[in-house]
Image: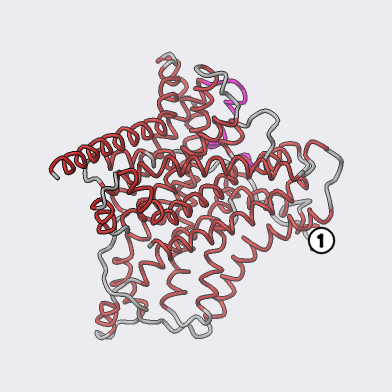
Amino acid sequence: MFETIRRTDDDEDRSAFGLFLLSGVIAVLVTSPLLWLFLRAAQVDPERAFSLVVSTRTVEILANSVGLMAGVTLLSIAIGVPLAVLTTGTDLPYDRFWTITAALPLVIPSYIGAFAFVRTFGSGGEVSEAIGVPLPAVEGFWGAVLVITLYTYPYVFLSTRAALLSLDMELVEAARSLNVSPIEAYRRVVFPQIRPAIAAGALLVALYAVSDFGTPAFMRVSVFTYEIYVEYGSFNVEYAALLSMQLLAVTAVILLIEARVGRDSGSTGGGRTARIRLGRWKWVAMTAITTIGVVTLVVPVAVFGVWALRGPDGSVPSLAFEWGMALNSVYLATLAAALACVFAIPVAYYSARSDSPLSRLFERATYVGFAVPGIVIGLALVFFGANYAPWIYRTVPLLVFAYVVRFLPQVVGTTRSAVLQVDDRLVEAARTLNAGPMETFRKVTLPLILPGVVAGGVLVFLTTMKELPATLMLQPIGVDTLVTVIWAAHETLYYQYAAIPALILVLISGLSMVVLLRQESGLG
């Protein structure tokens, strides 16, 4: 009997050590792209590096990037917070419908919206020609601010709305009992309570804005992401590396701020807060939400739909839609999702079952790629492939690895949540039947956590289909995908060729939201 117990303990120790090693190797792998970037930047002569960093052009790029981030963040707060209040704290009719309408812009990737806006408004745009009146062009810096805001304000809206729904109603009622108006009660009692949620959503918007590549690229705005790609295409790799380091520094500052202010407000309770009666203002509110829905959803889908029905102007066989492009996207996304699941299981399991600081460190390491802009990951792997592993450069394995680095946290998070929900008594029961750690995991734990793994894998699949910068920089020769065709259509000015790929990506984005909602209800 004692020999059996000793053997069981030895198996446990070996299993734990193996899990530790495997998690550590995965953590090193997914953070390794940053190492290649640091190495490349370190090769630049210090004097030249300093002159490039403080050059007028670099200062302009920094100013544009920070200005874009600030403008998008402030506008997102200005739109998202009032919408959250309208749908939770007023007598707005059909609030459920308006909530869905306000959240739906997340369905469309911002670069798809930017593509449609550039070709819809302004002289010669679809809407201008349809109504016979030239409309202002949506382009340049302010056009990018507007478009990114319209497709990212739901981050603020959803986080603020969640905080309002969880707010302790008694606080508001106590304020109302002192003859304070609903608006004054919100100002004095509600907003201090929901400020952390507003800040958390706003900082997500800021992180997205500073890392967005497609929208600034389509609108020709000189920001870090677009200029890194331009310098890379011009073989000016030194400047591209230095710009990437500066972009990482800006991202780190945003994450630091998020860590400090993105905390829970500590509110308890739940339910509706005191309702504000809108009166005739409810028509203004419904008109505003309807306008946002039409501009962000109806206009892009309608434009691409018209283009798809009308067909392209001119004949460019290389841009003509073929189902092989969609199949390539599906193939790459499937490989990325499968590999992400394989990587996520040991890291998530070790993090959930161990209290050691290293387990948390390994788990957090997998989140690096999600915080780092895709253009930076792509550039880092270009350096690695071109200089250290030319046999893998511009091949499917390297591109799939970039996707895994970028989106692995989506599986780690859902898998860890699923592991935490496994009843320890089931595992102990299997061990009492002399089942080893691996057999217990395979027969008991894995079937129980599989829904969480699959949910995360599906999310990786869907987001991989939409990834633009990493795909452009690491695209295997001869492997065209939906996003590369959209980019090529824009670069060659044959915009209509982007119609069908864009509509497919909108559908995929819609499925992403469905998966997210099911994930929240099933795992939260």
Q: Is residue 83 left or right of residue 101?
A: left
Query: In the image, is 112 to the left or to the right of 304?
Result: left
Identify whether 407 is placed above or below 55: below
Residue 327 highlighted magenta (yes or no): no
Residue at left 42%, top 39%? 343
Quadrant location of residue 131?
bottom right
Report the quarter where the N terminus lies. top left
Going by the image, does 421 lie left or right of 462?
A: left
In the image shown, does 56 or 454 lie closer to the viewer? Answer: 454
Q: Amino acid at mark 1?
A: Gly
Task: Pick whichever, 72 or 256, lies toward us.
Answer: 256
Kind of element beneath mark 1: loop
Residue 511 x/y as whole percent: 58, 58
Look at the image and give the residue range highlighted in magenta: 218-237
Residue 171 x/y as whole percent = 26, 77
- How many labels were placed on the picture? 1
The residue identified by callout 1 is 132
Q: Give whichever of 165, 55 is nearer the camera.
A: 165
User: What secondary structure characterizes most of the magenta part?
Assistant: helix
**Image quadrant where residue 156 sits:** bottom left
| Quarter-of-image position of residue 491 | top right
Q: Position of residue 325 (x, y in %)?
A: 71, 42
The answer to if 224 sits in the magenta stretch is yes
Q: Quadrant of the C terminus?
A: bottom left
Residue that extends furthest to the right in the rendered view of this protein? 314
